[in-house]
Amino acid sequence: MVTIAVNRGRPGGVRVKICGLTRPEHVRAAAEAGAAYVGFVFFPKSPRHLEIPQARDLALEAPFGVAKVALSVDATDAELDAIVKAVPLDMLQLHGQESPARVADLRARYGLPVMKALGVAEAADLDRIPAYEAVADQLLIDAKAPKGAALPGGNGLAFDWRLIAGRAWERPWMLAGGLTPENVAEAVRLTGAAQVDVSSGVESAPGEKDPARIAAFIGAARG
């Protein structure tokens, strides 16, 4: 398991997660560009969904020191058991409606750090954060999916970053939602985020990562 040391500094130390990787060459491109995390999606509705053997092969492409993250959405114990058994992972990312109790249970069950994604559209959405902060290892502050959306994330939507400007949480947190090479520097400036997550913002088509955009995103995030 990779030790995930979070730099809490400002832009020069921003850590980047490239999520929704589906090809070995894109895992290598993310690592070579300096990504701190690579994310693999286990959600059949997503164009970035992986079968377990495919995910295992991709995880083995990630060099030592790059954290491998499995994203799931309200997965059952049996589904997660199969993923964790077969894929070498460093973190679980929960992107569904998992309760704080569920987060705590999974953290204990697998002995892996857990990141909980929380959607934000308005100030009231921030009220949920403390309950998850008490049980998760990290928080992913993401744009809330529109009502009726098929995907809980990866929709290319941003929220009003001013809602979290100056916010400080006890747990490490990561900013997500609508980030691109063109806007990530401004997002970091406004929010003070020490970590950022991107998926659709570095794609040429849904599920198809663009190595040039990956490199541009990481460069821009770091300023």
Image (cartoon, helix red, strand yellow):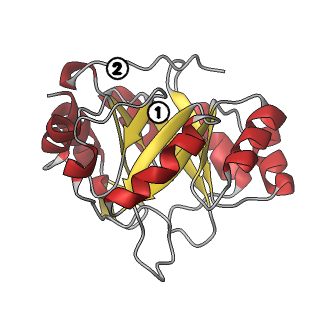
Q: Residue at x 13, y 49 (%)?
A: 182
Relative height, residue 40 to residue 61 (above, below): below
**Of the pair 45 and 158, the residue shown nearer to us:** 158
Quadrant where the C terminus is found in the figure: top left
Occupied quadrant, residue 168 = top left
Occupied quadrant, residue 186 = top left
Occupied quadrant, residue 42 = bottom right
Q: Is residue 132 left or right of residue 119?
A: right
- Amino acid found under the numbered disc labelled 2: Arg
**Of the pair 210 and 156, the residue shown nearer to us:** 156
> Where does residue 76 sit, x and y in percent of width and height?
80, 58
Mark 2 or 1: in front is 2
Relative height, residue 180 to residue 191 (above, below): below
Relative height, residue 188 to residue 11 (above, below): below
> Where does residue 162 sit, x and y in percent of width and height?
19, 49
Q: Residues within 10 Å of mark 2 (few under 14, many from 20)?
A: some
> Where does residue 216 sit, x and y in percent of width and height?
19, 40
Q: Secondary structure at mark 2?
A: loop
**Of the pair 222 and 161, the residue shown nearer to us:** 161
Quadrant where the N terminus is found in the figure: top right
- Residue labelled with disc 1: 37
Q: Residue at x 42, y 27 (%)?
A: 36
Which numbered dot is residue 66? none
Q: Residues within 10 Å of mark 1 (few under 14, many from 20)?
A: many
Q: Residue at x 20, y 20 (%)?
A: 12
Q: Secondary structure at mark 1?
A: strand
Which numbered dot is residue 8? 2
